[in-house]
Image (spheres, grey):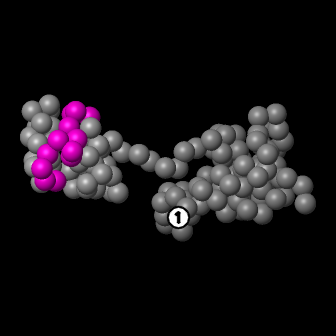
């Protein structure tokens, strides 16, 4: 099986195959190895966008190829959000904010004192 056919076998939206084949050929010089493409497709398939509404938001394969979508980063990092919670609701978030403010839990007798100091300083800094 050639690389395009392998790509097509794994790409979830099976429309406009001839256009996808054309895009595949046009991107030969910039396209990474097939293993990289398949890994990128697998990562994209796990995203909310591709799973939503029965996959209607999955781009056509030609669009995906021409857009060099194998370069997409599917992990979204929101500032001051840890484990899908605001920083002040997680120990990791409080410790990170404390470090940004020059505070360490070691400077305090109890965790709650550290947390209170971090909250107070973050309010002053804002």
Q: Position of residue 47 (x, y in %)?
A: 52, 58
Q: Nearer the viewer, residue 32 or 120?
A: 120
Q: Is residue 107 magenta?
A: yes
- Residue 67 part of the magenta-drawn span: no
Q: Residues within 10 Å of mark 1 (few under 14, many from 20)?
A: some
In the rendered image, the vertical position of residue 102 relative to residue 108, given as above or below: above
As rendered, which of 82 and 44 lies closer to the eye? 82
Residue holding disc 1: 51
Q: Residue furthest right?
A: 1
Q: Residue at x 83, y 53 (%)?
A: 4
Residue stretch rendered in magenta on the structure: 100-111
* Place of residue 95 in the rendered image (x, y in percent of width and height, measured from the top left): 26, 46
Residue 105 visible in this rendered orientation of the protein? yes
Which sits in the foreground, 110 or 31? 110
- Residue at 21%, 34% in the rendered image: 101
Q: Residue at x 82, y 38 (%)?
A: 28
Q: Position of residue 63 (x, y in %)?
A: 66, 45
Question: Residue at coordinates 25% horizontally, 56% vertically from top-left?
Answer: 90
Q: Nearer the viewer, residue 24 or 93?
A: 93
Quadrant (top left/top right/bottom left/bottom right) for the C terminus: top left
Quadrant housing residue 112: bottom left
């Amino acid at each position: 099986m050639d690389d395009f056919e392998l790509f097509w076998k794994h790409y979830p939206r099976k429309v406009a195959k001839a256009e996808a084949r054309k895009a595949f050929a046009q991107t030969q010089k910039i396209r990474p190895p097939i293993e990289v493409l398949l890994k990128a497709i697998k990562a994209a398939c796990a995203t909310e966008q591709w799973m939503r509404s029965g996959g209607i938001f999955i781009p056509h394969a030609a669009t995906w190829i021409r857009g060099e979508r194998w370069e997409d980063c599917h992990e979204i990092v929101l500032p001051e959000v840890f484990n899908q919670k605001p920083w002040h609701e997680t120990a990791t978030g409080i410790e990170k904010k404390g470090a940004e403010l020059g505070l360490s839990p070691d400077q305090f007798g109890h965790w709650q004192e550290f947390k209170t100091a971090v909250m107070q300083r973050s309010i002053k800094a804002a």
